[in-house]
Image: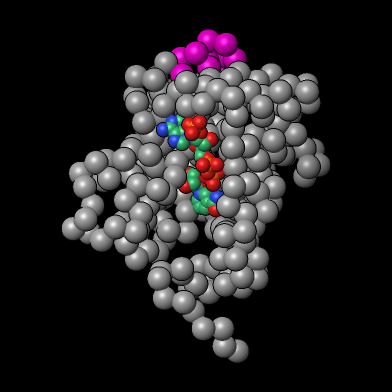
Amino acid sequence: MGVLDRFDLTGQTAIITGAGTGLGREFARSLADAGCDIVGVGRRLEPIEEIGAEIRAKGRRFLALGGTDVTDSAQVNAMVERAVAEMGRIHVLINNAGGGSAGRGKTLPELTDEDWREGMDSNITSAFFCARAIVPHMEEQGGGRIINVSSGWGFRGGKNNFMYSISKGGVVQLTKALAITYAQAGIRSSCIVPGTFPRREDVERVAARGQMQPSGRAGFPEEIGPLALFLASPASDYLSGEAVLMDGGAIAAGVTPAGVAPVAEG
Ligand SMILES: NC(=O)c1ccc[n+]([C@@H]2O[C@H](COP(=O)([O-])OP(=O)(O)OC[C@H]3O[C@@H](n4cnc5c(N)ncnc54)[C@H](OP(=O)(O)O)[C@@H]3O)[C@@H](O)[C@H]2O)c1
């Protein structure tokens, strides 16, 4: 077997939450390029169908499960049940859905109970629900891979960015707890830690933030897809419980957009 064969996912199936946009779309593209069938999950159907059309054109199977809110455990359980019923064995789960808008910019006393719940639900409860729903199936099938998506904010404190930092830090710990608990069941768990990757609608703003980083630029979404493929494939069979940063060196440099503009010196 050559080394590239270890990235082959032919005949395997991955559930990807938030597959219709941004990084999730790139994860779906990369895994499908390696032969994987995809279950695309999100609340809106339209973006899921868009990436679904692209993936079906590559000759892969694609199940579009729009209308699924991953912060609702009943909907998550139904989503996993349907994915297994229609696609058979699920080999990979990528917990990508999430976001950083809840309570952003508010001081601690300004944060409401609702802000707290929204931030936690969006990033950590959702990943917990999906992992809890898929693990019995993966155990029964003799293994699987769960990939969570954190953020650089999960590694640093952000000024008035409580919800996102706390929930994304929790995602790293969920990764470790899953890895340790299910290692003997053949289930690996890892975590992607993206730095700054502009979405279509905020390319200029985020690209400017990238200039503060050692790389001097933000990441291109298509640069992060291969990392998901590596973590989803047999190429990383001995990697578990680990968070892998892809951030152009931002965390290594201690760079943090914390409300204090860094001065570029030497
Ligand atoms: N882009 C970056 O620079 C960056 C950096 C660090 C970390 N991240 C993380 O990477 C992940 C993807 O981010 P992105 O930048 O690609 O953002 P995005 O384009 O907003 O993608 C988020 C996706 O998740 C889905 N989603 C959100 N909440 C959901 C829910 N409750 N139920 C089901 N689906 C839900 C959204 O679809 P619907 O709205 O249709 O549900 C959307 O497709 C997030 O976890 C984010 O925190 C991104």
- The image shows residue 37 at horizontal and vertical percentages of 66, 24
Magenta includes 87? yes
Q: Residue at x 36, y 31 (%)?
A: 71
Q: Residue furthest top?
A: 85
Report the magenta residues as a range: 79-89
**Which quadrant is the C terminus positioned in?**
bottom right
Q: Left of 55 or right of it: where is 192? A: left
Does residue 232 appear in the picture of this structure?
no
Q: Residue 105's spot in the image, x, y percent?
A: 34, 59
* Near-viewer residue (179 or 109): 109
Quick check: 1 left or right of 162?
A: right
**Residue drawn 22% across the image and 59% down it:** 108
Q: Is residue 132 left or right of residue 263?
A: left
Q: Is residue 217 visible?
A: yes
Residue 59: percent from left, percent from top: 78, 21
Residue toward you, 33 or 234: 33
Query: Looking at this view, is 86 or 1 the one in front?
Result: 86
Q: Residue furthest bottom?
A: 266
Q: Residue at x 59, y 42 (%)?
A: 22
Determine whether 177 is above or below 18 in the image: below
**Magenta segment, principal secondary structure?**
helix
Find out whether residue 16 is within the magenta segment. Answer: no
